[in-house]
Amino acid sequence: MEEMCTNSAHVNISEMIRKKRDKQSLSAEEINYFVQGVTNQSIQDCQIGAMLMAICLQGMTQEEAVNLTQEMKLSGAVLEWPKEWSSVIVDKHSTGGVGDKVSLVLSPALAACGCKVPMISGRGLGHTGGTLDKLESIPGFNINKSPEEIKQILATVGCCIVGQTANLVPADKKLYAIRDVTSTVDCLPLIAGSIISKKGAESLAALILDVKYGEGALYKNISEARELAEYLVYVGNSLGIQTVAAISRMDNPIGKRIGNSLEVIESIECLKGKGPKDLEELVTCLGGHLLHLCGKAGSFKAGEKDIKNALQNGCALGKFQAMLVAQGVTPDLARALCQGEEVLRCAIKQEELKAEAEGMMLH
Ligand code: URA
């Protein structure tokens, strides 16, 4: 059956699947048609699955990947900011790993240095905890904020960490769900489309990618990590976001504490300038690059120094505390949380897990 594209050209989804299956390139118009059909559900799930598998097996040119990402970004709302913020809206994406609590520290540290950080984070994947899960271990913390509320928090505090709103990149929700059940997650153009479209919808000026490799990471060797990093940087820059990637080795968890509430505690230690060295190093490196990219620092080194100062002088901690209150934590609890570990232990939900048998855990 032949279907109509919005611009009246004839586009046929099964013919598009055949083209991609046979390693031909899809035009910008065809990719627009595909993403619109995914979003408005006029393309069947089996056809989406077939197209994703064809992309996975035959790949995409860089031009196709950029077009796919741009169309995905435009499949829903795109956040808008006051003009005067246009150069300082920044965010980061991490490929994740056990004990990765960088967002909790980096976001307020960047706000303390004058950036606006509308951090849209995710839940845990597999055995790794998600930033949202960690923050939700603080009683009252609310990750659901509308675009208007996000803008308000950025105006007053400078940073927020929230979940994805329903109308932000709806095409990714559908595509990701189908990728998940069709073994098409591990595919560079689809990964780039998924990650960068969401960052594009945040209307960022600058983005840092934290790509990890090693025993504790998704990518076991540096060449895989480099390939992903280069791909994401290309697509990010093509969408008009100044994008750089840091590739870091991860053979062990980051910091010393693992588990949602424990990672909040360790993040607060880092926000006081007393965090574990590896966590502080990552935060200052990623933050240093972002401050340099968005023009808040004259060099990467100067940016690193600014982030370090914000951790030492209490400004980053102050931003974290203000962010907690702006996102639903009572002022008394937010103050207590940021003051000392004893209060933290009482305030944060704890759950005791009992081993079913005696034994030792070896690395
Ligand atoms: N994170 C995403 O949001 N999408 C991917 O495809 C992979 C990681």
Image (spheres, grey):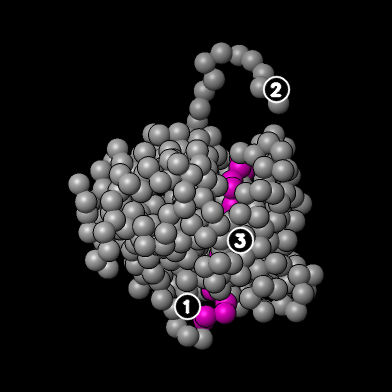
User: Residue 239, image x and y in percent?
Assistant: 52, 68
The residue tagged 3 is 234
The residue tagged 2 is 362
Circle 2 Cα neighbour tier, 10 Å, few/some/many (<14 / 14–19 / ≥20): few
User: Residue 347, image x and y in percent?
Assistant: 49, 49
**Which residue is more in the foreground, 228 or 63?**
63
Q: Which residues are magenta?
A: 85-99
Question: Which comes before the other along the chain, label 1 or label 2?
Answer: 1
- Residue 281 lies in quadrant: bottom right
Q: Residue at x 60, y 78 (%)?
A: 114
Tell me how far mark 2 sits from mark 3, CA to CA.
40 Å
Vertical order, 261 against 110 (above or below): above
Tell me how far mark 1 sits from mark 2, CA to CA.
47 Å
Q: Closer to the camera: disc 1 or disc 3?
A: 3
- Ligand 1 closer than 8 Å to label 1 CB: no
> In the image, what residue type sits under mark 1?
Thr
- Ligand 1 closer than 8 Å to label 2 CB: no
Q: Which mark is residue 156?
A: 1
Residue 125 falls within the magenta-colored stretch: no
